[in-house]
Image (cartoon, rainbow, N blue to C red):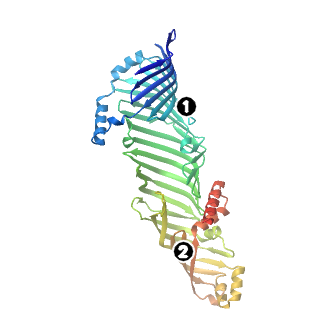
């Protein structure tokens, strides 16, 4: 069905105030202020409404519909031998101010389109008419030998504000080709991404960042996400961020992304992080590993690492190469501690009148559990029978006003308080347990004070218990942390106080 209003013929060509071409219950194309001539076609508005005819899709099985549709597509390959003729007889220039496409009366896109032809080539320029501006330009060349269009000088530019990235720019120069049933694109070395701030989720906030992007994409036509193939590499340069209440400083390295067969893999050959501060600072963190999962269950993938280590308290912690299957919890990983300095721990977690020195090694078996929450991506950690031990001799000195008052009111404790004023130990070892935010430390310390009872050997057993979540938050609030982290901690404390 064709319907028009306000048609006229002049020197410029044939004009319509409004022209509608439709097929009942399936498609309707309406153009307003349409001008058609041998060399030029323009329209202020071009609206395309597509409706799926439900009555024709009621068949014995969905599989039959899919198979039939696929067969029809395979039988209707685009005959590119006709393209030069079509290009020859089409207008030299096409301009559409607003091209809107609706599916089931829901608007899918709103574009401004400019097309110009040069022999067997087409210059295409497309831009969105929305607040989130995106621009696409490319030169399409007819390749009759390969039955496709070759794409040259492609350029895609957009903001990533809909994904939570403020003042962001994505620039993708590309080349490639498109046939009746397939699309292939490759970006050039100048592809880049930049943003001032990124609200990825309620837990993850990124600061300003820049990076370079290399990407290869292959897709079936019509688009099928299950058969999409993407290979990309992102170079990150000094990216800062916040995860929950932990501050992340200066992330640098390469991140590889692969999408294939409805799965994705994110990997890095070498990622360096200057510091992760969660109340205790992990410095010079180095990571080499990957995460692979399906799009249907993105939080139930497999984590694999070849290197995972960091400096802490002048020593280091690391996890030997291994992997975790998050779909089969609980899973265990073993954290090893090397040459942590006791004086650094006491400096970070000061107690009045307490000083000491020594070097500690350890081993913490960490079990990863599914958290008792509604979130699919939430996990809990537990530690059972972790081991700490000194690798050389050291000393502890503990004397303050509270301890003196305690000794005066309890004479039986005077010898102990005298001993720990300057206690030199030959052995210090302990066990660590952690669950539900509560850490329990059992210490056994053997040594003597040469100034008390002729240096008689002493065996001390000490039990300590601490709410680690509250301790780490208090340590962060006492540090020079960023204002966003401070606000997150204060909001969490306020929420817990209201319970």
> Going by the image, does 472 lie left or right of 383?
right
**Quarter assignment of residue 348:** bottom right
Name the quarter where the C terminus is drawn. bottom right
Report crowding for label 2: few under 14, some 14 to 19, many 20 or more residues within 10 A (C-alpha).
some
Camera-nearest residue between 395 and 64: 64
Q: Residue at x 63, y 66 (%)?
A: 497
Q: Position of residue 289 (x, y in %)?
A: 45, 54
Disc ID at residue 95:
none
Above or below, comparing residue 175 to residue 409 in the picture: above
Question: To which residue does mark 1 refer?
Answer: 129
Q: Secondary structure at mark 2?
A: strand
Cβ–Cβ under 8 Å for marks 1 and 2: no
How far apart are the two marked residues, 1 and 2, measured between alpha carbons?
A: 60 Å
Above or below, comparing residue 373 to residue 91 in the picture: below
- Which is more N-terminal, label 2 or label 1? 1
Disc ID at residue 440:
2
Q: Secondary structure at mark 1?
A: loop
Q: Position of residue 284 (x, y in %)?
A: 56, 57
Q: Nearer the viewer, mark 1 or mark 2?
A: 1
The residue furthest top is 11
Report crowding for label 1: few under 14, some 14 to 19, many 20 or more residues within 10 A (C-alpha).
some
Q: Position of residue 233 (x, y in %)?
A: 47, 43
Q: Residue at x 39, y 23 (%)?
A: 142
Camera-nearest residue between 172 and 223: 223
**Quarter assignment of residue 24:** top left
Q: Position of residue 9 (x, y in %)?
A: 49, 10
Name the quarter where the N terminus is drawn. top left
> Going by the image, does 65 lie left or right of 140?
left
Number of numbered discs on residues: 2
């Amino acid at each position: 069905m064709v319907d028009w209003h306000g048609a006229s013929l002049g020197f410029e060509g044939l004009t319509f105030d409004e022209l509608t071409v439709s097929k009942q219950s399936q498609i309707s194309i309406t153009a307003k202020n349409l001008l058609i001539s041998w060399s030029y076609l323009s329209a202020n508005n071009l609206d395309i409404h597509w409706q799926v005819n439900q009555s024709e899709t009621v068949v014995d099985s969905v599989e039959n519909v899919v198979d039939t549709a696929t067969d029809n597509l395979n039988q209707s390959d685009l005959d590119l031998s006709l393209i030069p003729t079509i290009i020859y007889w089409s207008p030299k220039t096409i301009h559409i101010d607003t091209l809107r496409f609706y599916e089931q009366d829901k608007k899918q896109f709103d574009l401004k389109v400019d097309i110009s032809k040069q022999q067997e080539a087409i210059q295409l320029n497309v831009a969105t008419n929305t607040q989130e501006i995106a621009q696409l330009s490319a030169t399409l060349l007819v390749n009759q030998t390969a039955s496709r269009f070759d794409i040259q000088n492609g350029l895609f530019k957009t903001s990533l504000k809909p994904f939570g990235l403020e003042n962001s720019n994505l620039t993708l120069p590309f080349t490639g080709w498109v046939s009746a049933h397939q699309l292939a694109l490759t970006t050039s070395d100048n592809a880049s991404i930049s943003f001032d701030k990124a609200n990825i989720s309620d837990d993850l906030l990124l600061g300003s960042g820049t990076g370079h992007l290399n990407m290869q994409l292959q897709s079936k036509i019509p688009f099928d996400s299950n058969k999409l193939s993407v290979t990309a590499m992102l170079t990150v340069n000094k990216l800062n961020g916040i995860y929950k209440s932990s501050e992340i400083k200066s992330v640098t390295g390469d991140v590889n992304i692969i999408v294939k067969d409805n799965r994705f893999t994110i990997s890095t050959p070498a990622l360096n992080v200057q510091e992760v501060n969660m109340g205790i600072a992990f410095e010079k963190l180095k990571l080499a590993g990957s995460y692979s999962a399906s799009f249907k269950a993105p939080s139930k993938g497999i984590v694999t690492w070849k290197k995972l280590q960091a400096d802490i308290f002048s020593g280091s912690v690391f996890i030997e190469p291994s992997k975790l299957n998050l779909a089969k919890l609980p899973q265990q990983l073993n954290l090893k501690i090397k040459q942590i300095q006791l004086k650094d721990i006491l400096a970070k977690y000061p107690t009045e009148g307490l000083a000491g020195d020594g070097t500690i090694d350890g081993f913490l078996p960490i079990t990863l559990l599914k958290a008792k929450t509604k979130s699919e991506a939430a996990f809990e950690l537990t530690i059972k029978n972790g081991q700490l031990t000194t690798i050389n001799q050291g000393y502890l000195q503990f004397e303050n006003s509270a301890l003196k008052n305690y000794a005066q009111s309890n004479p039986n404790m005077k010898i102990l308080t005298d001993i720990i004023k300057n206690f030199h130990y030959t052995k210090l070892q302990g066990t660590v347990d952690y669950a539900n935010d509560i850490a329990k430390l059992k210490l056994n310390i053997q040594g003597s004070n040469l100034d008390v009872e002729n240096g008689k050997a002493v065996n001390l057993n000490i039990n300590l218990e601490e709410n680690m979540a509250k301790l780490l938050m208090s340590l962060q609030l006492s540090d020079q942390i960023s204002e966003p982290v401070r606000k997150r901690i204060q909001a969490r404390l306020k929420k817990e106080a209201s319970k």
